Amino acid sequence: MNNDFYIWLRTSLFYDMNDWESLLMNGIRPFLISAKETKYLNKFTIYLNQKRGDNIRISFEVLFDKKEKFLSYFDHYFKDYLINNPSLSNVKHETSTEPLNLFKNFPNDSIQYNVYDPSLVNFSQNYPKEFESFGYFFSRILLEKKYNRFSSYESIFEFSISLHILMIRSFTINIRKANSLFEEILVKTDFNNLYLGIVPVLDSRFEKNKRTYLALFKNIWRSDYTALPYSKDWVDICKQLTIKSSSFKDYSFTISRVLSEHLNLNNLEWFAPLYLCYKMTLNSK
């Protein structure tokens, strides 16, 4: 396909976080299957988000001369979906984004257009070329029922930890080596300058939940990890990306960053899974 004839469209579905799983599986997934059949849609990316309200961002790369038809189809489909399937709660959640919000939240159960930066869908502006396919691949993972566990911040956070463990597990089976790799990635985050203040908080969190964290790590590391529901596809894409790089830590750092953007784990919350994985490997030697 010639991308010169395609254009990116940016949409946001504002929907209570408690019901994101339902929206992904019963709304977005069927829509994308149907949209693919029209031949208008080439690619899509999905990001969980909480800026100006709980929402799921979907960007579509569609045929330029069919963009109006596609948007009309999208708008009609999801207006009907939101009327018949309103999110069950309007409880204000503790968000994982900036605490200071200068703009009023968008209404829940609403569709919005072009409310985020176009660079979000243009990986070539922010990451190595090889990562262009990563965003599309990971968006498909978010739509698979076996992966879908996004109804709370804690479930998203645990999912991120699991994927970080698998990322390193795709490279080495040696726990000591894994610990060194996590340490190298942490150094690359410049945590001594940016995140040092949160380290005591994470240390405390780890000690309070040490048995749970180590059990999670053991389950992923020492078992047949390819049998885990979300693992094989994830490990495959990590291997494809890192094998192209002479520096595993550089590509792992980028994988971690992009993953966290898709899961709405920004700033300090991106650092936390990396650090906790470092602690797990340190205590599993």
Image: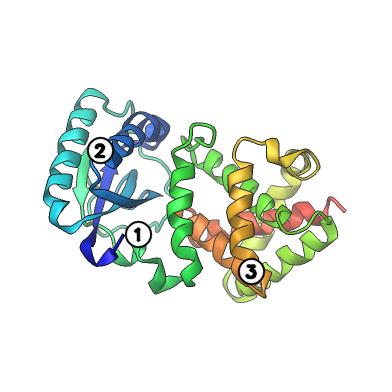
Quadrant in the picture for the C terminus: bottom right
x 64%, y 46%: residue: 162
Quadrant position of residue 100: bottom left
Q: How far apart are marks 2 and 3 (CA)?
A: 36 Å
- Please state if 132 lies on the left or on the right of 255 as rendered: left
Q: Earlier in the sequence, mark 1 or mark 2?
A: 1
What crowding class fits label 3: few (fewer than 14 Cα within 10 Å), some (14-19), or many (20 or more)? few
- Please state if 233 lies on the left or on the right of 215 as rendered: left
Q: Label 2 belongs to which residue?
A: 108
Type of amino acid under label 3: Leu
Check residue 100 in the rendering and tell me which mark sits there, or answer none. Answer: 1
Between 182 and 133, the one lying in front of the other is 133
Q: Label 3 belongs to which residue?
A: 196
Above or below, 196 against 136 in this view is below
Quadrant position of residue 186: bottom right
- The reply to whether discs 3 and 1 touch (Cβ–Cβ < 8 Å) is no
